[in-house]
Image (tube, rainbow, N blue to C red):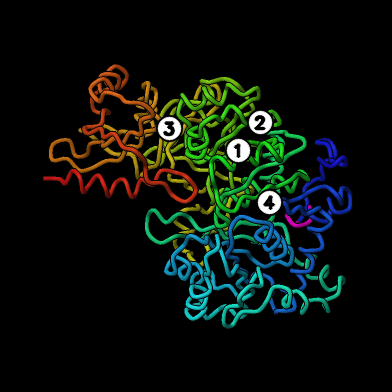
Amino acid sequence: MPNNIVTLNQLPPSVPRISDYVDWYAEHTPVAVAMVLNDHRISYKDLQEKVDALAKALIKAGVKKNDRVATLCPPSPAYFISFLATASIGAIWVGLNPLYQLNELSYVTGDSTPVVLLSRSKIEGKDIGPKLTELMAISPSVQSLVILDNDDLTKGGQSYQGFISAGADVSDQDLQAVRQNCGGRDPCLIVYTSGSTGSPKGALLHHQGIVENSLQQNHIWPISPLSMLNYFPVNHIGCVVDLSTPVLVAGGTIVFMEKFSPRRSLEIMESERITFWASVPSVFQLQFAEQNIDEFDLSAVQLIAWEGASMPRDMIKRLLQYDCPLATNYGMSESCGAITAVAPTRDLSVLENTVGQALNGVDIRLLGDDGAPVKKGKTGQVLTRSIYNMTGYWNKPEATTEAISEDGWFATGDLACLNPDGTYSIMGRIKEMYKSGGYNVYPREVEDVIESFEGVEMAAIVSIEDPIWQEVGVAYVLQKEKISIDKLKEHCRSLLANYKIPKNILLVDELPLLPIGKVDKVALKKRANEQFPCK
């Protein structure tokens, strides 16, 4: 660990551009390690030189303010350098997931119309040159294809080193002049939603939102020195805003892992002395499924946190065995990350049942079906307003108008209730809520009950049509040890009203997951409809 770490009370203040933190730490802690990939370590001074060089090359290539630059690569230093360089000159960065098929890639490039595409030619040892050639043929906006690893140049592509060399004649003064013309509410990032309801939409995020959200996260979860392991896909808010930028703002170290492996992730956490163990619930479960997990020395961890979904009670108990506090939060791409958070705690009830309180500067309303505020303790749709919120959906004015009111309230589509202590509890999605016999059923409430049954690892509930009750639930239950469905139903009957109990409970070996690790309920609902067709 470098000996010139900046302490929490020395952190830089809010800045106009998220990329400005590179310069600040290059001046104050130049030899501190900013990024790690395998045995390769990049200091803050190195990071500054690499960001500046790429920014100049982008300017030389004709990239202007609000132009889009796309990057196709695994989570790695190249991704973060490309994001920071792009944002620093007022352009807008778009991450492309290497796992995407050609039609998925072409949708994003067709919608965001990038002028430059930076890409690896090989990913996990596989040549993606043919895919890039096809993508270029159907992406007319792309004027420059730059191959990051310089290997086996795809037809029409140029080497990264050649691209960088071409920008060498852009002066430092010209670079700074371009940078001074952007920042604040100017957009710098498009994050595409999962597309669970129709085509994906690109949330347009800005410098101010990313800067302030990162500062807030570091304030609520103070960790010094801050180091995190990042294996999330580069197109996801979790990779960019939840893991990468808070570490940059704190002058910490991002340790990248290009392909997730449960055991390897634990090995890296041990060897790199990771201080913030942060992920999604499904990843924690994969890690704890590893044999001899207790043999890993994770004593450097100062805080354990999860996001994206609720954590089963038994898993929280297992995490509480570590000698550090735990936390969680709630947010989305459109809000530029978290809007509520649990402060570090070891209170099982708080961690299991709430997502904490609203962040400073975040307003939250809970509205019922009639559009009126619900009473405390009642369930309503979450609306949020803050400086963090997106400016809108890229190239979709109608969707923006539908989601954001004239006075700035964003309708999340999530359901929550406000507890007496000021914390919030998430009840699920509006589209996941269903009516059974005229009563509202919130899947998350039922999933919590099922997950409290001994032997259950995780539960996911979707609804299907029913000729008598209108809709009924189907529960897919992942078990960690053999359980009895009859006894599980008895458990549910003791804790839930009859209409909330799923009509069908199925034990499964695995649940379908989205790339970020959340349960893919769209796929589950399709499966349920096929297994239990309405008659």
**Residues at circles 2 and 1 in contact by the CB criterion of under 8 Å:** yes
**Residues at circles 3 and 1 in contact by the CB criterion of under 8 Å:** no
Point out the tag, 3 or 1, that comes first from the N-terminus.
1
**Residue position marked by numbered label 3 in the rendering:** 374
Point out the tag, 3 or 2, that comes first from the N-terminus.
2
Range of magenta residues: 17-21
Any mark on residue 266, and which? 1
**Residues at circles 1 and 4 in contact by the CB criterion of under 8 Å:** no
Look at the numbered disc 4 and give the secondary structure of its residue.
loop
Instruction: Calculate the distance from the C-alpha at mark 1 to the C-alpha at mark 4.
Output: 14 Å
Is 80 drawn above or below residue 430 in the view shown? below
**Residue position marked by numbered label 2 in the rendering:** 298
**Residue position marked by numbered label 4 in the rendering:** 38
Report x, y in % for residue 227: 71, 41
> Observer-nearest residue: 155 or 54?
155
Point out the tag, 1 or 4, that comes first from the N-terminus.
4
Point out the tag, 2 or 1, that comes first from the N-terminus.
1
